[in-house]
Amino acid sequence: MMIEKIVLLSGPTATGKSSLASKLAEKINGEIVNADSIQLYRDLFILTARPDIEKEKIKHHCYGFLDGDINWSVGKWINEINEILKDVIKRKKVPIVVGGTGFYFKAITDGLSPIPDIDKSIRLNIENELEKNGLEELQKRLAFIDPKASEKINSNDKQRIMRALEVYEGTNKKISDFWLMKREKIINYKTINFKIDADREWIYKNCDLRVDYMFENGVVEEVRHLLNKNYSENSPIMRAIGVDEIISFLNNDITIDRVLELIKFKTHQYAKRQITWINNQMISWNSINTQYSNKIINEIIKKL
C-alpha cells in the first residue's frame, strides 16, 4: 500500500461512518479527518453526534474546534485539512477523511471553485435582510438575479441562498457562472473513495434511534446551555437540525413528543438529500454496505 494515499469515506447520517473509520484506522495505521461541516463546532456534542475524540484510541482532526458563530467555508476547510494531511502523511500514517458533507468531498476530488473571499459586511447585510424580510424574499431575489442557481438550490436551503446572494453582491458575478469555471485543485494526493450504500428504511430507523439516544442523554440541557451563549439565530451552530425544535420546547410552544417527531422527520429529509448527492455525485466511488457486511474492513483494505 502506497503511503501517499488518502482514504475518503462518505455516507448518509447514522450509517456508522465514524465507527467504521476508527476500526479501519486501527488496521491500516490511520488517523481520522472530519468532513462533516456541523461537527467542526465545539458546541452541541450530543446533538451533532460528534465522536468523543478524548476517548478514542485513534487521533482525530478537525472536530469541535470552532465557536458556533464562525462561518467556515469549503475553502477554509480544505486549506485547513491540506496542512493536516501533509502532517499525517509525513508521519507515515494514512489519512481517513470521513463525513457526510458532499461539498467537502467534491473539493478534494474535483478542486475548489474560484470564488474569491467575500467581505464580511456583505454577509452581515444579507443576514439582516433575512431577519427583516424572511427567506422567501431572499429566494425571490436570487431567482431574479441568478435563475440557474435558484433552480438548483433548494428553496429552503437558507445557507446556500445566502451564499449565492453574497457572491453576486461581492463579485458582480452569478454563482452559477463560477460553477462553470475551472476548479483549483488543492489536494493532490491519490484518493481511494468509498461510499456507504444501505437500505433507506434501515437508515431512517437508525436516525430515529439516534434521536432517541440524544434525548436520553441530555440534549435538551445541551441546547439550553447553547442559548446562554447568545449566538445570532443565523449563526452556523444555530442551524443544526433540532435546535429550533428544542428551543420551541424550552419556550413551552410544543410538547416533547412533537419535538421528537419533528427532529426525526428533518433528519430523514437530511439523509434523503445526502443519498441523492451520493447517487448523483459519487457514481464511480466504491460502494460498501455497513448494514449487512461484517467483513467490510477487509473489503476496504483489499482496495487500498
Image (tube, rainbow, N blue to C red):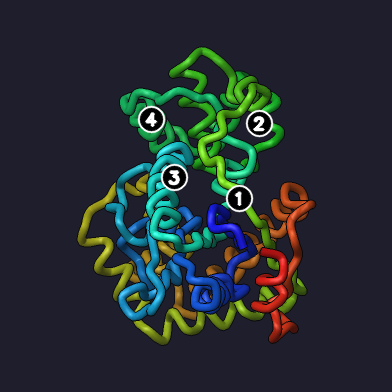
First in sequence: mark 3 vs mark 2 = 3
Dot 3 falls on a residue whose secondary structure is helix
Q: Amino acid at mark 1?
A: Gly
Q: Amino acid at mark 3?
A: Asn
Q: In which quadrant of the rendered view does residue 92 lie? A: bottom left
Q: Amino acid at mark 4?
A: Arg
Residue 51 vs residue 174: left or right? left
Q: Which residue lies at the image location 26% right of the left edge and 61% below the top edge?
A: 227
Circle 2: is it few (<14), some (14-19), or many (20+) Cα within 10 Å?
many
Horizontal and vertical percent for residue 50?
42, 69
Along the viewing direction, whichever of 175 and 252 lies nearer the viewer: 175
Image disc number at residue 123: 4
Q: CA distance from mark 2 to mark 4?
A: 18 Å
Along the viewing direction, whichever of 178 and 6 lies nearer the viewer: 6
Residue 17 vs residue 275: left or right? left
Position of the N terminus, as image quadrant, is bottom right
